[in-house]
Image (spheres, rainbow, N blue to C red):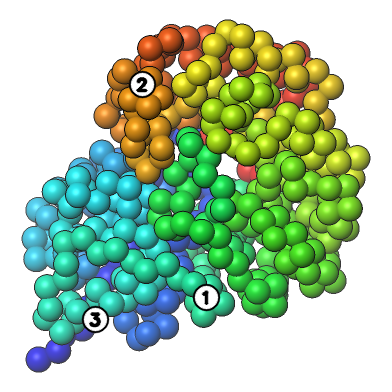
Amino acid sequence: MIKEVRTVLINLPIPFVDDDERQPPGGLVSIATYVRSKGFDIKVCDLSGVLEDNLIDYIEEAEIYGIGTYSATYDIAQKLLRELRKKYPKSIVVAGGPHASALPEQVAKDFDVVICGEGEYVFYDLIKKVKEGIIPDRIIEAEVIKNLDDLPFPDYDYFCNMSKYTRRIDNLPVICLDSSRGCNFTCRFCNSNVSKRGYWRARSPENVIEEVRMNYDKGWRAFRFNDDNFLADPKRAMKICQLIKPLNIKWRIFARAESLSLDICKTLLDAGCTHISVGIESLSASMLSKMGKATSIERIKWGLNNAFEAGIRTRGFFIVGFPGESDETISETIKSLEGLKLGEATVYPCLPYPGTDLYSRPDHYGITWIDKNFSNYIQVGKEKLTGYAIRTNTFGPEDMQRWRDILMDALKQNNINWCDETKEVV
């Protein structure tokens, strides 16, 4: 007899930040929307804002549980796994997300099934197998979804209580979307491609606007594009601007600075884009090269100047402590801050996340110690708390902390506002 299969996807809280209810779990909602479109019973249990000791009380009984895993909260995932096995011993518990995708063999020692990569198609296949009484593989490598237009639009209003989320743009509640997945760049500190499994793929402008219009008709007037690089294909981005302009909405993007020509910035602003976040990382030429950023200080300044002239607000992300960092390279970055047209910034410590080149080849970078307690992998937490997880043959955690303090002070001296990402709403 073929049985019905109830599935619950779980988004874990992030206890080390002030506000972990900024936006719904987009990846889980996308998976759930696809699975539901195939006729299966599936729910999303968003535990953001829930005290860590009470998680199990919020989770209903199901045949399959899927937990999105991130390195910094993997200890919470392990704790919840133990509680699920105790309360619902016959259930299958699946791990997905960046941490599971980067370390599948290790995670498979804990979980029943590990999904590596994008989860929509493969999770649906897993549920079908369970329904038919077939035991799924321990580790499942998902194929890259080539045509993103084939996916249904994430149904946030069905799966989430959207009133709980705090992210805003110009005081308007925000809904998020992805117009593309993946990244064509290979920055050595970045693990963004781990769960997206590689190259950049884009939705058609028409498909993107159809999703925007769907949410517009539901009352949404502010949108956050979560793409790693919205301007990876400038012609496509400009077409989206053309189609989105008549809606008169507010929206923001992530982009590389060298993509920000003055014409592009003016077109973005005219279409309602008010904010651009940029990964600057360093303003030392040698550090940009070591990080594999494939850009220059001149191109970064050029892009930020263009955004400033066009009237778009900018946020920059800096990294301190990538192998090769020194007092000299920090001084080079600080010197280049003078006159930099940047509105606000955040400074992260270099953390060797699983899936990065740093984590895979520590000897190559002169790393002599890596903290394997992933709960310490905090980029920016409460009261600007951070984690320092590496030591090299030239510096240690105490140097990274000192450099971060120096750079934060230099940003202030150059009238660049500190962005507290544990509280920010943009």
Q: Earlier in the sequence, mark 2 or mark 1?
A: 1
Element type where label 2 sits in the image: strand
Task: Please indicate whether residue 170 sits to the left or right of residue 174 in the image.
Answer: right
Task: Give the residue type that dot 1 points to.
Answer: Asn
Decide if residue 381 is in sight here. Answer: no
Instruction: Report the residue at 16% width, 70% height from top.
Output: 136
Disc 3 residue type? Lys
Task: Inspect the image, locate mark 2, and give the three-letter code of the amino acid beneath it.
Answer: Ile
**Quadrant of the image for the C terminus?**
top right
Tell me how far mark 2 sits from mark 1, CA to CA: 39 Å
Q: Nearer the viewer, mark 2 or mark 1?
A: 2
Mark 3 sits on what residue?
128
Secondary structure of the residue carrying tag 3 is: helix
Marks 1 and 3, how far apart at CA: 22 Å
Q: Answer with mark 1 or mark 3, whichever residue precedes in sequence.
A: 3
Q: Which mark is residue 367?
A: 2
Name the element at disc 1.
Answer: loop
Per the image, the residue denoted by label 1 is: 147
Up the image or down, 45 lies above or below 384; here it is below
Left or right position of 113 against 13: left
Instruction: Classify mark 1: residues with Cα within 10 Å, few (<14), some (14-19) or many (20+).
Output: few
Q: Residue at x 25, y 76 (%)?
A: 127
What is the quadrant of residue 282 in the picture? Answer: top right
Tell me the quarter of the picture where residue 41 sits. Answer: bottom left
Going by the image, does 298 lie left or right of 393?
right
